[in-house]
Amino acid sequence: MATPAQLLDENIEEILLRIPPDNPARLINAALVCKPWSRLISGGRFRRRYHEFHRKAPMLGFFYDDTQMTRFIPTSSLLPPHAKDHVVMDARYGRVLLCGTHVHVDFEVRR
């Protein structure tokens, strides 16, 4: 028979599984509640169950290429910090590579 602490952990996991994926800040906030919750949320078992439970990844937003700059149009509550200071370099499989426009980096090619 499970101990009360184990039952509580299982109930917490079931509740956390129901946090909607279209608002990732809620899952991050839940992970910051305490170390046990952080371990639970960052664990492989929870992540697998979370993906199985929600099946499809949400569309958090999209990038719109304006003539002057690339804009992020959110379709959820996600607002990346300083989105206007970044340019889309590439995108593959739902991941986007951004480059900060406020950073100047020189590359040198040597032979």
Image (cartoon, helix red, strand yellow):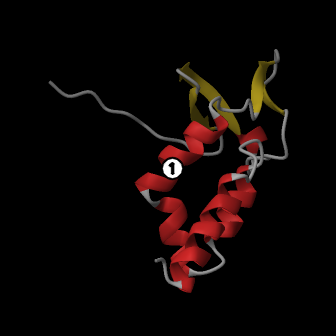
Pinpoint residue 108: horizontal percent, then vertical percent: 31, 32
Q: Image quarter for residue 67?
A: top right
Residue drawn at (58%, 29%), measured in percent from left and top?
Answer: 96
Residue drawn at (47%, 40%), measured in percent from left and top?
Answer: 105
59 lies above or below 100:
above
Q: Image quarter for residue 110?
A: top left
Crowding around mark 1 (Cα neighbors within 10 Å: few <14, some 14 to 19, many 20+) is some
Residue drawn at (65%, 45%), measured in percent from left and top?
Answer: 102
Quarter of the image that includes the C terminus = top left
Asked whether, in this view, residue 88 is left or right of residue 90, the answer is: right
The foreground one among 49 and 27 is 49
60 lies above or below 32:
above
Asked whether, in this view, residue 7 is left or right of residue 72, the answer is: left
Pinpoint residue 40: horizontal percent, then vertical percent: 51, 66
Residue drawn at (57%, 84%), measured in percent from left and top?
Answer: 4
Q: Which residue is mark 1?
A: 47
How many callouts does the rendering have?
1
- Outermost residue to the bottom: 4
- Outermost residue to the front: 1
Q: Image quarter for residue 38?
A: bottom right
* Secondary structure beneath label 1: helix
The foreground one among 49 and 5 is 5
The foreground one among 99 and 8 is 8
Asked whether, in this view, residue 95 is left or right of residue 79, the answer is: left
Pinpoint residue 6: horizontal percent, then vertical percent: 51, 77
- Outermost residue to the left: 111
Q: Amino acid at mark 1?
A: Arg
Pinpoint residue 89: horizontal percent, then vertical percent: 56, 24
